[in-house]
């Protein structure tokens, strides 16, 4: 898989007009880089179809529901994998810390993950600890999020699994982790995955970093943190910075 950069717009921007401008600016700006980098736009639901219409980039949803009945269902406010696919999404994020903060449990995340993978979506499972720890011990919470999240899912479905390491203290805070921290944590995550699902499968799973990534530090995370990609919030809303970031990665 190519390096993958997911632009998580969260609940931004506030109008369709601004969303189209952002979609267009990013799509044009990264055109030269997409041979080397998979740029994935993750707008909020009302803008997914706009992304499809105005961009050739890949599209992700920020969440989905765990039920995916062929004929739809009575689940007010939810969105199914089938619906997402029908508007062109091929990626989805599950278990983002901002969703967990609203009450999403590991159990809910597991159900979403299973449904998304079964539906053939490239699915990014977010894991991360609340507090920064000085030692490099593997935080229990990450272990739990991995084990509970991947529980009872057929190993063959992990072909489309992506893990995003997002320490909560670094998300939206402009206090990014260091590339060295990220490198150590991804080794621990990969080692745990090997124990869980075997070496070959674990080695094939892309591991991303997310948390205050910008155009200045992105290349360091890729090079020294040795991640397979990035999950980018704030910076993905500033086209100039985001395009500069993608360019810095494409030339690595
Ligand atoms: P940030 O967000 O880049 O604004 O820290 C990252 C994320 O929430 O995925």
Image (cartoon, rainbow, N blue to C red):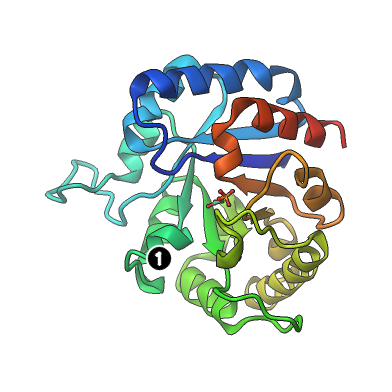
Looking at the rendering, in which quadrant would you find the N terminus?
A: top right
**Quadrant in the rendering for residue 70:** top left
Residue in the picture at 53% in, 77% down: 147
Above or below for 186 versus 231 = below
Residue in the picture at 63% in, 33% down: 39
Residue in the picture at 41% in, 37% down: 12
Front residue of this view, candidates 149 and 211: 211
Q: Is mark 1 within 8 Å of ligand 1?
A: no
Secondary structure of the residue carrying numbered label 1: helix
Front residue of this view, candidates 211 and 53: 211
Image check: 220 left or right of 161?
right
Instruction: Give the residue furthest to the left.
Output: 74
Image check: 127 left or right of 32?
left
Q: Residues within 10 Å of mark 1 (few under 14, many from 20)?
A: some
Residue 30 visible? The answer is yes
Above or below for 132 versus 15 = below
Residue in the picture at 60% in, 54% down: 162
Rendering coords of residue 81 (x, y %)? 35, 44
The residue that mark 1 highlights is: 100
Rendering coords of residue 28 (x, y %)? 63, 15
Residue 95 visible? The answer is no
Above or below for 14 versus 146 = above
Rendering coords of residue 32 (x, y %)? 75, 18
Instruction: Give the residue furthest to the front.
Output: 174
Rendering coords of residue 71 (x, y %)? 18, 41
Front residue of this view, candidates 237 and 37: 237
Looking at the rendering, in which quadrant would you find the C terminus?
A: top right
How many circles with numbers are drawn on the protein?
Answer: 1
């Amino acid at each position: 898989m190519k390096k993958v950069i997911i632009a998580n717009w969260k609940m931004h921007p506030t109008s369709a007009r601004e969303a189209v401008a952002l979609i267009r600016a990013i799509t044009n700006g990264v055109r030269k880089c997409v041979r080397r980098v998979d740029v994935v736009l993750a707008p909020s639901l009302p803008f997914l179809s706009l992304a499809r219409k105005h961009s050739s980039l890949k599209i992700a949803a920020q969440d989905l529901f765990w039920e995916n009945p062929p004929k739809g269902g009575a689940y007010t406010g939810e969105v199914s994998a089938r619906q997402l696919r029908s508007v062109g999404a091929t990626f989805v994020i599950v278990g983002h810390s901002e969703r967990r903060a609203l009450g999403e449990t590991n159990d809910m995340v597991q159900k979403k993950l299973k449904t998304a993978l079964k539906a053939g979506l490239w699915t990014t499972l977010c894991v991360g600890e609340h507090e920064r720890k000085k030692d490099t011990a593997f935080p229990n919470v990450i272990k739990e999020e991995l084990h509970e999240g991947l529980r009872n899912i057929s190993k063959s479905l992990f072909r489309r699994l992506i893990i995003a390491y997002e320490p909560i203290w670094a998300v939206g805070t402009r206090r990014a982790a260091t590339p060295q921290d990220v490198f150590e944590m991804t080794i621990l995550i990969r080692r745990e995955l090997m124990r869980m699902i075997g070496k070959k499968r674990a080695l094939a799973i892309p591991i991303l970093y997310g948390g205050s990534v910008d155009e200045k530090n992105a290349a360091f995370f890729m090079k020294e943190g040795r991640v397979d990609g990035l999950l980018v919030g704030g910076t993905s809303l500033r086209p100039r910075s985001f395009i500069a970031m993608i360019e810095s990665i494409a030339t690595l």
